[in-house]
Image (cartoon, rainbow, N blue to C red):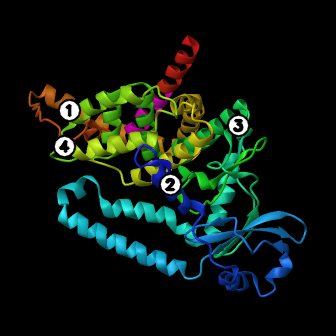
Amino acid sequence: MLSTRPDMVSQAMVEEFQKLHDRVEPRPFAHFEPVLAAELGRDWGTRFHRVDTDRPIGTASLAQVYGAVLADGTPVAVKIQRPGVRAVMEADMALLKKLARFAGRRAPRLNAVIDFEAMLGVLFDAMRPELDFVLEARNMRTAGKAAAGFKHVTVPDVLTATPRVLIQTLAPGCSIRDADPAAFTLQQRTDIGRDLLAFMYRGYFLDGWFHADPHPGNIFVHPGEPAHVIDWGMVGRMDRSLSTHILRVLLSVAQNDGTALAQAWIELGEATPWAEVSAFSADMVALVPKVAAASLEDLDFGLTLTSVLERSTRRGIRTSPMIAVLGKSFANIEGAIRHLSPELSLLDVFEAELLHIVQGHIGKFVSGPQAFHTLIEGIENGTRTSQHVRSIIRDLAEHRLTLNVARPQGPPAAWAPFGGASQRLRDAALLTMVVLWWRRSRTTR
């Protein structure tokens, strides 16, 4: 992630870290041939007309990738897992979990705000499909369907997948990091950048399923071709509620509303008993105007999330563990697109996608199963409410009504009176207002 953050490390460090994406020191092909034989059979060579074994086209910590041509003449990429890497990765995960538990015991107050072990758990859950290429292939097929609605984004086709070998169609061009912007027209660069951002936004806010590692080495571009998004081993998943809260966070930034951002962030997590809610709100009021209208050249929303996280931690606001994966994904995609289209405005692209996202949410809200579930909850809550009303009327008639008033603890979401159904109704109302706001602002412009 640091390789995409020139705002945090020097250019020399950026260039060195970039080598970890796809330029790890290669191992000889003989090191990987036993894996091919074990996964595809000893006659694996009959599948190919040629395999370029002298020089891999990609080398990373978990696998090496070789260019090849199938027997029918189709150019492909062959991804082969490093022998023994599963045991190494699982040992690393176990060690990091121990360190997280140790850190939690040593700093219980900080751990109450940032649950180190929970954040690592979310990150590891997203990473585990990288160890099984069958799962990665399944992710690629799902991503391919999601990309079908975009003209300038696509995902390679899976041709063969086993747990340790993945054969896919070859992405043309080169990493977006190595592409020469001058080789593209301004329209091509803008179209690719907008579609990449829109594709990721829909994953974050509509599908609840997104590429968690879209660093520059995982995006290939070529003039006149759509951007190819590769390496789908690491994906993040969010439920509807979390996705809606993240949407509200970004919408608050787009509207230059620091108070709304603070409220959305608190509802995304939880205010601890020692939380300084008013101070956190003041922090957001000061932060948002600095990022509300910047281009990608000036704004890094991944950095903005980091800044919000830093302030919320200091003010005692507990944060959702999903921020670990989401912030990484945001930082990666912004760092990747910055190489090709630095003049893009993240928030302009977000606003352009907003109507589609909102319509999708409303469609899900009124869909058969969801509508039925909400209706049942509404009937149950309505029955309980009518019983409460009758009880109050009876107490009033008999002059024995007592009203106890107490100051609620925690953010408003913690003491909402009608539970899940009203939360969904509130979300639907919010999304409807977003549509009206968006249409009005577009008409004004």
Q: Amino acid at mark 3?
A: Ala
Numbered tag placed on residue 237 in the rendering: 2
Vertical order, 197 against 131 (above or below): above
Q: Secondary structure at mark 4?
A: loop
Q: Nearer the viewer, residue 280 or 59?
A: 59
Q: Secondary structure at mark 1?
A: helix
User: Badge 1 is on which residue?
Assistant: 278
User: Badge 3 is on which residue?
Assistant: 182
Q: Secondary structure at mark 3?
A: helix
Left or right: 400 as drawn, with respect to 42: left
User: Badge 4 is on which residue?
Assistant: 275
**In front of the other: label 2 or label 1?**
1
Residue 146: percent from left, percent from top: 66, 48
**In front of the other: label 1 or label 3?**
3
Pointer 2 or 1: first along the chain: 2
**In front of the other: label 2 or label 3?**
3
Badge 2, how many Cα within 10 Å: few under 14, some, many 20+? many
Q: Amino acid at mark 2?
A: Arg
Q: Nearer the viewer, residue 384 or 309?
A: 309
Residue 303: percent from left, percent from top: 41, 42
Left or right: 216 as drawn, with respect to 418: right
Q: Could you give the CA–CA distance between mark 1 and mark 3, rounded to whole angstroms?
A: 49 Å
